[in-house]
Amino acid sequence: MQAKDETASMIRWFSWVGIDRTDLAVRRTDGTMLWHRNLPVERLPLDWVRAENVRGADAYVRPVRTDNWPVVFLDDVPIEVAHRVGRKYAALVVHTSAAGGCHIWVLCQRCLDEQERAHAQRWIASRVGADLGSTSGEHLGRLAGFKNWKRGGTWVNVLMATGGLPWDPAMALGPYVTQCVRNVTHCVKTIYDAAPNPLSATGRDTSESGREWGWVCGLLESGVDRATICHRLTERARPRRGADAERYARHTVARAAIATMA
C-alpha cells in the first residue's frame, strides 16, 4: 500500500471502534511538540503532517485524552507477539520498526477512563513484553503512513487491523474497578455480527451522524439509560450542531430506542 493508504487504514479502524476524536502531535528535530487537540478523526491535517515528516518530524496520534475510550495501547511489542494478539482479539497492530516492534491498540468490551487504561496497560504489558514505560493511560502511538525518524526513517505501517473479539479488561482492573466504579461513567462497545470488516472502506454510513447513530444504538443495547445517552450525545454534537444539538440528541435517541426496541 502507499503511505496514504496506511494512514487511511489506521483511521478507518479507529472510526470502526468508535474513536471519532483524536489528539495529533508532531515532534520536530529540536524536540518541540506541536499539538492539534480534539480533532475529528476524519479531519486530521495530514498534508501538514506530511510536510513536517519530510523535514524530519515524527507523527503521533491518540484518542482525545479527555474522553473514555474502548481501547488500550501497547508500545514496543515483539512482532510475533503482536501477531498472536491481533489474531485473538480485535486490534490494530502498527509496525513501527524492526528494532521497536509494534504498537497495538486493543479493542475492549467497554470504555475505560485514563486511569483505567493505565491499569490495564500495565497488566497487559507485563505479560506480553511491551514497554512498561508507556503505560500512562494517555500515551501517543505513531501515526501509520509516516516515517519513524527515531529509527532512521523507516516507514510506519499497519500490520493488522482485525475485527475479532474485544478484550475483557475486568481481570486486569480487578480491585481498582471495585473501588472506583461508582465514580466513573462507563460505556459499552457492542460488536455486531453484521458489522463490516474494518479494512473495508465502504459498506456503512461513515458520516458524523451515522457514527453517532451506531454509538447510540450500542449504548441502548448495553442498558445505558436514555437520559444519560441524550446528555452525552448533546455534548458530543454541540460543536457541530450548535443550538440544535439538544433537539438532535432527543430525536436521535428516540428513533434509536424504537429501532433497538429498548
Image (cartoon, rainbow, N blue to C red):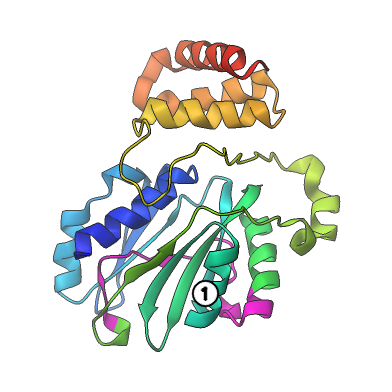
Residue in the picture at 54% in, 70% down: 74
Kindly tell me whether residue 162 is visible in this rendering: yes
Q: Residue at x 40, y 89 (%)?
A: 99
The vertical placement of 231 against 152, above or below, is above
Q: Is residue 59 above or below residue 41?
A: below
Pick the quarter of the image with the N terminus: bottom left
Q: Position of residue 134 (x, y in %)?
A: 55, 74
Q: Is residue 138 magenta?
A: yes
Near-viewer residue (222 or 62)? 222
Q: In which quarter of the image is residue 60?
A: bottom left
Q: Which residue lies furthest to the front in this view?
A: 194
Left or right: 196, with 192 as reference point = left
Q: What element carries label 1?
A: helix
Q: State whether residue 217 is above or below residue 246.
A: below
Of 86 and 12, the residue lying toward us: 86
Q: Quadrant of residue 188?
A: top right
Q: Give the range drawn in magenta.
A: 125-149
x then y, percent, for residue 237: 43, 26
